[in-house]
Every structure is written in structure tokens, then in C-alpha cells.
Amino acid sequence: MSSCRQNGQWTSDEMMAVAAARELGDGVVCFVGIGLPSTAANLARRMHAPNAVLIYESGCIGSRPDRLPASIGDGVLSETAVANVGVVEIFSYWLQAGRIDVGFLGAAQIDRFANINTTVIGAYDTPSVRLPGAGGAPEIAANCGEVIITLPHSRRAFVEELDFVTSLGHGTGSGHREQLGLRGRGPSAVISDLCVLRPDPVTKELTLTSVHPGVSVDDVRSATGWELAVAEDLGTTPPPASEELAELRELKAAS
Amino acid sequence: MGEFLSLREAVARYVEDGQTVALEGFTHLIPFAAGHEIIRQGRRDLTVVRLTPDLIYDQLIGAGCVRKLIFGWGGNPGVGSLHRMRDAVENQHPCPIEVEEHSHAGLAERWRAGAAGLPFGVLRGYVGTSLADHTKTIASISCPFTGEELTAVPAIHPDVGIIHAQQADRDGNVMYWGITGVQKECVLASRHSIVTVEEVVDEFAVRTGGVVLPAWAVDAVAVVPGGPHPSYAHDYSDRDNDFYASWDPIARNRDAFANWLAGVTGEAS
């Protein structure tokens, strides 16, 4: 894993969390995966998005935890929620019915069309690595208005071909989601510890749009398992502001 | 009928080899003590169902109780893998297990159909994923009214559903609150049900989000304070996150697991 380089002021993990948090707009309704997505979503809520509604698949709607939940069923999510509903209801009435603006997901592996594998490495029946599996992700990826994905960058994670598609991103590219009748627009951004990738508006292939400070295009290329498309107007991600770092560290210290 | 039994009696009466058994609870209220009792009674060839196998099924799988696992997300929440489950899937240790894999939304829909007495549930799910290629209990169906293509999943009807609740009253009605998961569906979909509870009270308080299951919908109630440890019971205990972390090295190593197992079965070496 590449994720602990220090520049003296902040780590690449902190840059990843801050960049992911910036993707979440104020007032949006967000279905939050546990781990990195939850860190980013809660940082966003404490910074620029105080009115974001965080929804967890444990049935907690509008949670405002003052520390990072240790699991998707952490009591702090339930105690601070506006409403608690059952798991059948959260998936059926709230997610499937199209009430969620943004799905915020992590991933073990991703391909150039932002399809996600969290199931197996190797053959399904004789896997070399058995990963945890789907959880809520397939329907979050299918039914949210858009999807933000965050995961650390490496050749093991950003692969040419997935052994298993657990959650659909843009499938085989342009038009595939529409052809399948999916209601959500699919992934709008992938935030790693090196960069930000966004789907090309036409082909839907992930394109490098912004490198984090101190990261070169070659760094991203060498950590990516496919031939990387780079945007003509490639930018540099603004470094974490001191307020962002302070909030993130406070959140982590409380957890 | 909500009959008060000891946990040992309840498991002995209702859980048999070869059955389909579900011990539910979404991170919260996981009936660990009941799982340990199934291990102690040496049940074998079980088909076990849970959205998140969690440590409770890692333990049952490692103890050799399980022939088939129906699940949605098999990790140690916030820690990593379930290593007994992985050892069974990757190396067939201590015995091969069959895996039937769903998403949480799909499995939740299977629970709802089971509770509702319908043969199948319907959802917008699985489309474009590899899950449908490997799981036979995922099928396409078209809406008879609009023609829209949707996904069907069969109802789950376990032989025994087991949950933990905070309270029972003296008539055997049970009440739980906090994160409520799919426990209601689990009890209603199962042929028999066992509920372990923290305590018996004279009267339930009115609680926001509280769920009451009437005594006549439950077969057995067993008073097991602390029954969900290392999971938790809202307003009674906190999740033992340290235990979840400490499970990782235990489950990674077959000998360490055997030692842990001996502590549960009382056959410590």
C-alpha cells in the first residue's frame, strides 16, 4: 500500500479523505459505506456540507456521529439518527425508490469503467482470495443518483480486468447503464491517495483529472493496471487546508 | 407461545442437524450465546443464513457446524476478513462449505418474502453484476403490468430463526430497539424461533423505534444477559470492538481457534 507518505504536513491518506469529502455537496442525501467513505462523508458534514443527510444501511437515517463509527451498526449512528428503520425498509423504500442522491463506496478492486470487485480474486469456485462480498454496494451503485468511490491506489486495486463484477460502474462504457435500465447515473468520481479520476463524458472511461500535490502523472500510471487516459486540462488537487486537517484529525482522535 | 426455556433447552428442542438456521442481528443484538450453545451441542450440516456472517458464523464454520452459508457480506466489520470462513472456502477446512451469495438488498427481500408468506421477493438489483451468474437464487422476472424487467429472489424459510432482544415481559412478548436489522422478518419467516433477552420486565416502556414481537409469534424465550457479546444490546452494553480486533489473530490460526473453541465447549486442553 502506498498510503503513508508524509510531506511533513499531511499524509496521502489525509489528502485522500479530504479530496473525497470535497466531492460531497451540502444538502445532498448520501448513502454511506463504512470505512473511507464514512470518514470522508463525516468530514464533509463538519466542513462545507453541514446539511448533508448521511444514511447507513443499518437503517440509520440522518446520523450525525461525533466520532467515526467502528462498524456500520455502531450505536452512535442509531443514537444520532433522525430516524431508525429496518434493513428491508432502508433498501426498499429509501434506496430502491430513488430517494438517495449520492452513494459513497469503497472498493477492493476497480477497473477503467469504475466497476467494482469486492467478492473474489481468482476463479469464483476456487478463489485465491475470498473477499467479504457484496453487502449493500450493488444496489447502492445501481440506484443512487450518482456514486463516489474512494480507495487507495495500487496495481492490485486498479486492474485491467476484474475477476468478478460485484457492483456495476459504467459496465463496458458508454450507454451500458442505460441499456440495462439502471436508474442511477453511476460513478462520477474516483478518489485515491494519488489523484482524482472522473469518467469521460462520452466514453465513460475513467480519466485522470487531478493529481494530488507532489504526485506526478507517471506515479499514477505506474500504480494503475491499465493504460491511463489523462485529461487535457489536468489539474492539481488543492492541498488539505489547515481547517480540513484539523477537523479530520479531531474526528479520528475521537474515534 | 413465548415459552420460557433455558438456552440449552431451547436449542436442544428446536435445532437439529441438517436444518436451515438463521441467527440474525445487524451488527447490533447478534445472538452470540445461542451460537455458542449450537457449537456446544455439536450440531452438524447446518445451512446458516445471515446478511453479515460476522464472527458468529466464523465461529460456527470453524467449529464444523456448517455445510452451507447463505450471506451478503462476510467480513469482520472494521477489522478485515473472516478467516475461518476463508479457510473453509479457500481450503475446505474443517470441511467444505457451499456458498450462496447475495447482496444485502436481495437477501433482505428474501427475508421480507419469507415473513410475508410469499414465494419470492422482487427488487431492482443485481443487474449487470456477476452475482447472478453464480447464484442460482437470482432470476429475472418481468412485471405483468408494465413489462419492466426486475429481479426475483426466493423467500427464505429457516427451520429455526434465532435473535436477541433487550426485553421480554412475563407473558413472553419480546421487545428490542436501536438498530433493528431484519430480526422481525427472521422470526416471522422461520418455522420456529428462539429469542434470547437481556431481562424480563413487568411492562414495556414506550420507545421510539421499538419493535414488539407478540409472544404467540415466538416459540421460546431464554433469558441470557450479555447474550450478544461481543456484539451489543443498545442501552445495556457497548460493542466490544477490542474483541472484534482480537478475533483476527485467533481466527487466522487453526491452533489458536482450536484453543478458543475448547473454551466454548469446556474441553480446554
Image: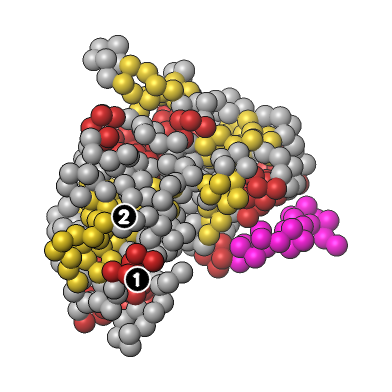
Q: Residue flagged by tag 2: what amino acid is it?
A: Ile
Q: Is residue A99 left or right of residue B257?
A: left
Magenta span of residues: B246-269
Chain of residue at mark 2: A
* Predominant secondary structure, magenta span: helix
* Colour scheme of the picture: secondary structure
Q: Residue flagged by tag 1: what amino acid is it?
A: Asp
**Horizontal and vertical percent for residue A29?**
21, 50
Whole-number angstrom distance, CA of label 1 to CA of label 2:
20 Å
**Horizontal and vertical percent for residue B74?**
53, 48
**Would you place residue A86 above or below residue A45 in this image?**
above
**Horizontal and vertical percent for residue A129?**
58, 52
Frontmost residue, B41 versus A140: A140
The structure residue drawn at horizontal position 23% and vertical position 35%, both measured from the top left corner, is A175
Give the number of the disc on residue A149.
Answer: 2
Query: Which mark's residue is nearer the viewer, 1 or 2?
Result: 1
Say which residue label 1 marks: A219
Quadrant (top left, top right, bottom left, bottom right) of the N terminus of chain B: top right
Frontmost residue, A119 versus A155: A155
Q: Residues within 10 Å of mark 1 (few under 14, many from 20)?
A: some
Frontmost residue, A129 versus A208: A208
Q: Can residue B185 be seen by looking at this rendering?
A: no
Q: Residues within 10 Å of mark 2 (few under 14, many from 20)?
A: many
Q: Secondary structure at mark 2?
A: strand
**Horizontal and vertical percent for residue A80?**
30, 58
Is residue A125 found inside the magenta-colored segment of the image?
no
Frontmost residue, A25 versus A236: A236
